[in-house]
Image (spheres, rainbow, N blue to C red):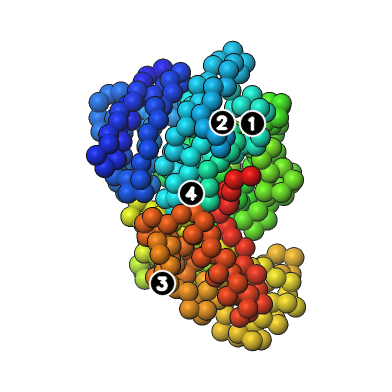
Amino acid sequence: MAQRRIELACGALEYGQIVDETRILRPHRYGVRLHAPRVIEATGGAQDLRPQLERPRVVDADLECRERLRVGIGEPSGARELGRLGEQRVDARAQPLPRRRVLRVDAVAMLGERRGVAVAAAARAPRSLVLGGGSNVLFVGDFDGAVIHVGTRGIRALSRSDTHTVVEAQAGEDWAGFVRWTLARGLNGLENLSMIPGCVGASPIQNIGAYGVEMRDRFHGLSATRLSDGRQREFDAGECRFGYRDSVFKHEEAGRWLITRVRFQLAHHAAPDTGYGDLRAELDRAGIRKPDALAVADAVCAIRTRKLPDPAVIGNAGSFFKNPILPREEALAVLSRAPQMPSWAAEDGTTKLSAAWMIERCGWKGAREGGAGVHAAHALVLVNHGGATGAQILALADRIRDSVFETYGVRLEAEPAIIAPL
């Protein structure tokens, strides 16, 4: 396997490391102001990743799957050696979690790099955490358990009919890059989900969605490994029990499975969903009456760039709160007191209310408490202006939630996973 070099500049501290499946990344500590990483492939060409998330990234020259699992054990008392897990030895050393925390709060776990030890490490640890892109995670302290980062890469077409192609992506693939890959090959259906940060493997857990489309609308199936014993299993859509930003993997199956591959059924002929108000307005401004999938993707990227802050510039995890979904009668009672609040019909006769509208009307848009704040352009987005801890960001979120409840009687739910010490 070709070796690839990662170079990361961090203030006065710089390190370079050849990365393959057998070597451990050496410990390093960095602050919240991380310079843009540069990745140098084996061929020697350099790529500037400044427009993307500020994190080291391995760039593969082809689409062949690279099996790469980063596994570690964390415990409050510090470093320890795990001994033998299967046939391989893991020397886990205390170090900060990789730059996959776009809210930029510091957290420490024990990290090593080895292939094929994820199940054994998870079984021996007090608890485990599967970490993908880290774009939907807020650490409020050091993690005292096994941290498994999935770095598998690869995309392939599994089957093709006259109308659709089933495409499978490895869990470690960057979601936004995967969407671009499908569109470049004339496969339609994921264009509304362009530019969503994170990895493919996290998409079914959250049932990611944007601009009128959810991941489940294109989902075909997934493969997963049970962390307790290594059992392999396939999940179809019914077994995943998808809901609004929800799935079975956030409830009774939470923390039990390592998703390894996800499959999507994508159309050969474009039938874009442009019913979402902001999206339709963006296309109208561009004078596009009959958009194809690429035009929709461009419009979505334009909206997201304009409305959402770049994590490379200011730490954020995108929308921090879900839009609350209430039974129709309860929603009508809320709307009777706030008739101007945007609302949408949801499934099973429920109604979705605008969390951003309520937060803004409660006076939180643009507010700041120390390093933690609410973005001035989008009330759903909490930001780390610099130096805020996870606990401080969570405390701000709790105050916003209490304020909305006192004003409207609606309890907001956080969208990111909140990771706290035991």
Residue matched to label 1 = 125
- Mark 4 and mark 2 lie on one chain; the one further toward the N terminus is 2
Q: CA distance from mark 3 to mark 4?
A: 21 Å
Crowdedness near tag 2: few (<14), some (14–19) or many (≥20) residues, C-alpha within 10 Å: many
Of tags 4 and 2, the one toward the viewer is 2
Label annotation for residue 73: 2
Q: Position of residue 277 (x, y in %)?
A: 50, 71
Instruction: Evaluate if marks 2 and 1 touch, with contact meaning CB atoms under 8 Å apart.
Output: yes
- Does 134 appear above or below 66? below
State the residue lying farthest toward the front: 77
- Mark 2 and mark 3 lie on one chain; the one further toward the N terminus is 2
Instruction: Evaluate if marks 2 and 3 touch, with contact meaning CB atoms under 8 Å apart.
Output: no
- Mark 1 and mark 3 lie on one chain; the one further toward the N terminus is 1
Q: Residue at x 53, y 43 (%)?
A: 142
Q: Nearer the viewer, residue 65 or 360?
A: 360
Instruction: Evaluate if marks 4 and 1 touch, with contact meaning CB atoms under 8 Å apart.
Output: no
The amino acid type, in three-letter code, at marker 4 is Ser
- Does 157 appear above or below 182? above
Q: Nearer the viewer, residue 37 or 298?
A: 37
The amino acid type, in three-letter code, at marker 1 is Ala
Of tags 2 and 3, the one toward the viewer is 2
Residue matched to label 3 = 366
